[in-house]
């Protein structure tokens, strides 16, 4: 059985210039790397607004909290390639008990 493609989630809000730059960087790599790119507007959800506040853009790769405030193309691609083989169990980011800060060690 084929594994589902890796997922990259960008948490953003309207009129966030830095968020638009991050989205542009990730979209550049999407066709070649074949990941699912989800964009979530935190302003539509009070829990997400409280969770992220001004710490956007926030990027999760396969459930791992990977970046906030910005990325370079090289850093995004390196971290994406490191995490694409790993998956955290499906959990809602709004779960306050979730451990989103730890990523697997380099192999």
Image: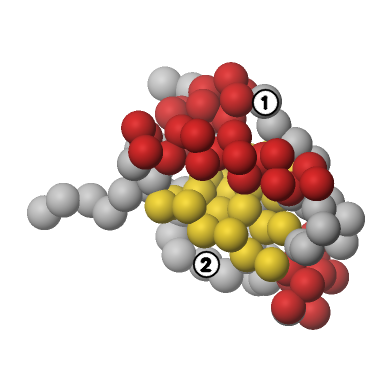
Task: Tell me: residue 71, above or below residue 20.
Answer: above
- Residue 20 located left or right of residue 90: right
Q: Quick one: SS at disc 2?
A: loop
Task: Tell me: residue 52, above or below residue 2.
Answer: below
Question: Which residue is located at x 43 percent, y 29 percent?
Answer: 81
Question: From this viewpoint, is residue 88 visible?
Answer: yes
Task: Tell me: residue 33, above or below residue 56.
Answer: above
Q: Residues within 10 Å of mark 2 (few under 14, many from 20)?
A: few
Question: Which residue is located at x 35 percent, y 32 percent?
Answer: 32
Q: Position of residue 80 (x, y in %)?
A: 49, 33
Q: Position of residue 96 (x, y in %)?
A: 71, 68
- Residue 75 located left or right of residue 51: left
Q: Position of residue 63 (x, y in %)?
A: 52, 53
Farthest residue in the left direction?
1
| Residue highlighted by disc 1 | 72
Question: Which residue is located at x 68 percent, y 58 percent?
Answer: 11
Q: Quick one: SS at disc 1?
A: loop
Question: Which residue is located at x 39 percent, y 45 percent?
Answer: 35
Q: Residues within 10 Å of mark 1 (few under 14, many from 20)?
A: few
Q: Quadrant of residue 52?
A: bottom right
- Mark 1 and mark 2 lie on one chain; the one further toward the N terminus is 1
Query: How far apart, in angstroms, are the residues tagged by discs 1 and 2?
Result: 27 Å
| Residue highlighted by disc 2 | 91
């Amino acid at each position: 059985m084929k594994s589902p493609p890796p997922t990259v989630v960008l948490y953003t809000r309207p009129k966030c210039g830095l968020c638009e730059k991050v989205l542009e960087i990730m979209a550049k790599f999407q066709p070649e790397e074949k990941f699912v790119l989800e964009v979530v507007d935190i302003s539509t959800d009070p829990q997400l607004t409280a969770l992220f506040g001004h710490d956007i853009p926030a990027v999760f790769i396969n459930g791992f909290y990977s970046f906030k405030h910005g990325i370079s193309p090289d850093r995004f691609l390196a971290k994406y390639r490191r995490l694409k083989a790993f998956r955290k169990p499906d959990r809602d980011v709004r779960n306050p008990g979730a451990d989103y800060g730890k990523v697997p060690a380099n192999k």
